[in-house]
Image: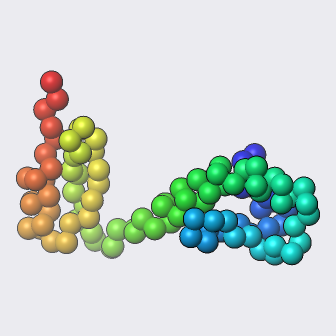
Amino acid sequence: MTALSKIESAGFRVFLKGENLGIAPSDSLTESQRHFLKQNKVEIIKELQSQVIWEEIPKPTPNAIMVTVFTPAGNALEVEARNPLHAEFLRRMNPKPILH
């Protein structure tokens, strides 16, 4: 069980407030829970940040033109093109690299 899931299972909502943690209802925290949060703050923030990243990734629009492009290291990525001309541009500019 992660530190975040442990505090959430105790009935608290944990969220990011800039670089800090927010918790609700904060007035219900016991001293031991406050200590737990302080001890696990970095881990909880990292977990919340990873959730935010995944939640912010937009879903492709219906009938989207999806194009496979490649990073310089050769990793494939699926991206959405605005139109067929844009799709062709993405393919030309991001081909699969020849790694030696």
Looking at the picture, does residue 73 appear above or below residue 63?
above
> Percent x, y for residue 19?
57, 65
Please, is residue 99 above or below residue 45 in the view? above
Residue 44, x across and y down, in percent: 66, 54
Residue at 21% in and 50% down = 69
Residue at 56% across / 70% down in the picture?
18
Residue 25 x, y percent position in the rendering = 81, 75
Q: Nearer the viewer, residue 75 or 46?
A: 46
The residue sitting at the top extreme is: 100
Residue at (40, 68) in percent of width and height: 59
- The quarter of the rendered structure image containing the C terminus is top left
Horizontal placement of 1 versus 10: left or right?
left
Is residue 6 visible in the rendered structure shown here? no
In this image, 6 relative to 31: left or right? Answer: left
Q: Is 75 on the left or on the right of 26, as rendered? A: left
Examine the rendered structure and indicate whether residue 2 appears above or below residue 65.
above
Q: Is residue 38 above or below residue 19?
A: above
The colour mode here is rainbow
Residue at 26% x, 64% y is 80
**Does the image show residue 25?**
yes
